[in-house]
């Protein structure tokens, strides 16, 4: 029996090695499992954040169209009322004149009054008819579903698959988009992750918004403000986004493709509760070298090195709530941190003049 001990030790050694290999494989699988879950969750968040942004901008476009129709309708009705009242007042006036001439008046006065009455009667009055405003085509908002698959294999069951379809839009069937993870390598922590757009930017009738496949095209028109500059800022603060999307680890990102931005400023601004107070901010003029404004935070030396931007350039801002700093990328080239000591009660913003354009990218 003692002679069999070496054989038993060798068997135990092989068994231990096999278990260690299985443990290593289990650990790798667990890492892939957690990382793939985070990746799919981010994809879901990004997809539906895009839907929300498109829905908001579609509503703004519809309200802008309604406002334009109201303006043209008001002009038409006002003009018709003026011409109608003018002719009615003319007829009333000449009626009083003819009643007076019946009790005495020279022939030339009668002829002159008839000539004036004839001119008044020939004046055209626009006829107005119609049923007012109506929605002739309500359209259809189609939200595709996501087909989400988990591939997890067990030694006891060689092919064990769990499938769940997150069907949005009233239970429609899965779309061609299929998110499947088969244990690919996780993304290194040092690699820069492209965060989706979490912010929403409400605009009014001074800004025309057009939804495009990759973003919302914005044009400043300043209809009500006499051609002055118009400021647009995000509805949410960075703190709102950080609390809502904890998976982003305290980071908030947004991208802008520049159009006609000769005098445009882009940056961040405080969101204050007192409407009478003047908010502080930090504003960068990308079309001119070295022009910044505002008193929020502590600018770094990278501000002086920010390049001059041209039409079509994509500027990405990245706010790091953990380090309270603002970083800038130009066409995905890192320009470095430009502002330190930035608190999270800030909103993304841009300020532009009539005729200037930019695209807020999804």
Image (tube, helix red, strand yellow):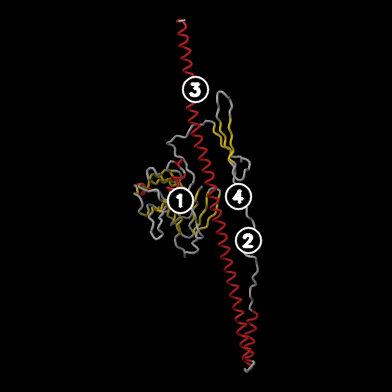
Q: Earlier in the sequence, mark 2 or mark 1?
A: 2
Going from the N terminus, do you reach mark 3 or mark 4 first?
3
Q: Nearer the viewer, residue 304 or 153?
A: 153
Chain-order first, disc 3 or disc 2: 3
Answer above or below: position of 174 versus 137.
above
Q: Earlier in the sequence, mark 1 or mark 3?
A: 3
Residue behind mark 2: 134
Foreground of the two, 36 or 165: 165
Q: At 52% from the left edge and 30% from the top edge, which residue is drawn?
A: 183
Q: Real-space Cα distance between discs 4 and 1? A: 25 Å
Per the model, the C-alpha gap separating discs 3 and 2 is: 68 Å
Q: Secondary structure at mark 1?
A: loop
Give the answer, above or below, for where 73 lies relative to 281. below
Point out which mark residue 170 bears. Answer: none
**Quick check: marks 4 and 1 in contact, CB under 8 Å?**
no
Question: Horizontal and vertical percent for residue 105?
Answer: 62, 94
At label 3, counting other C-alpha atoms closer than 10 Å, the crowd grade (few under 14, some 14-19, many 20 or more) is few
* Kind of element beneath mark 2: loop
Which residue: 56% across, 31% down?
151
Distance from disc 2 to disc 4, alpha carbons, whole Å, reads 19 Å
| Label 4: which secondary element | loop
C-beta proximity under 8 Å, tags 3 and 4: no
Closer to the chain start, of discs 4 and 1, is 4
Whether residue 118 is situated above or below residue 175 in the rendered picture: below
Residue at (63, 43) in percent of width and height: 172
Residue 149 image point, x, y percent: 57, 35
Q: Which badge, 2 or 4, is on the more N-terminal residue? A: 2
The Cα–Cα distance between marks 3 and 4, rounded to whole angstroms, is: 49 Å
> What mark, if any, has residue 236 been given in the picture?
1
Q: Residue beneath label 3, please?
A: 22
Question: What crowding class fits label 1: few (fewer than 14 Cα within 10 Å), some (14-19), or many (20 or more)?
Answer: some
Q: Determine which of the numbered discs, if any, sits on residue 141 in the image.
A: 4
């Amino acid at each position: 029996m003692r002679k069999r001990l070496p054989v038993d030790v060798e068997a135990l050694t092989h068994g231990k090695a096999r278990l260690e290999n299985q443990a290593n494989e289990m650990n790798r699988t667990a890492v892939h499992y957690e990382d793939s879950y985070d990746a799919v969750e981010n994809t879901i968040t990004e997809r539906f954040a895009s839907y929300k942004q498109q829905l908001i901008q579609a509503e703004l476009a519809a309200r802008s169209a309604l406002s334009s129709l109201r303006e043209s309708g008001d002009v038409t009705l006002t003009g018709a009322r003026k011409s109608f009242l003018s002719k009615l007042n003319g007829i009333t006036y000449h009626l009083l004149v003819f009643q007076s001439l019946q009790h005495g008046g020279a022939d030339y006065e009668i002829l002159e009054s008839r000539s004036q009455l004839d001119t008044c009667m020939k004046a055209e009055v626009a006829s107005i008819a119609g049923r007012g405003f109506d929605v002739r085509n309500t359209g259809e908002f189609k939200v595709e579903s996501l087909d989400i698959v988990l591939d997890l294999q067990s030694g006891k069951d060689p092919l064990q698959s769990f499938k769940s379809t997150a069907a949005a839009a009233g239970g429609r069937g899965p779309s061609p988009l299929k998110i499947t993870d088969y244990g690919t390598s996780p993304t290194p922590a040092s690699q820069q992750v492209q965060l989706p757009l979490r912010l929403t930017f409400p605009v009014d009738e001074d800004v025309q918004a057009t939804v495009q496949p990759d973003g919302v095209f914005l044009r400043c028109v300043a209809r009500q403000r006499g051609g002055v500059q118009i400021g647009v800022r995000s509805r949410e603060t960075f703190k709102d986004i950080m609390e809502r999307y904890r998976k982003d680890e305290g980071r908030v990102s947004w991208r802008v493709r520049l159009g006609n931005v000769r005098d445009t400023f882009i940056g961040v601004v405080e969101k204050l509760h007192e409407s009478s107070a003047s908010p502080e901010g930090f504003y960068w003029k990308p079309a001119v070298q070295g022009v910044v404004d505002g008193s929020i935070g502590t600018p770094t030396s990278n501000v002086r090195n920010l390049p001059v931007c041209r039409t079509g350039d994509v500027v990405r801002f990245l706010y790091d709530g953990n380090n309270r700093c603002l970083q800038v990328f130009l066409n995905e080239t890192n320009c470095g941190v430009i502002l330190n000591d930035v608190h999270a009660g800030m909103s993304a913003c841009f300020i532009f003049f009539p005729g200037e354009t930019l695209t807020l990218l999804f």
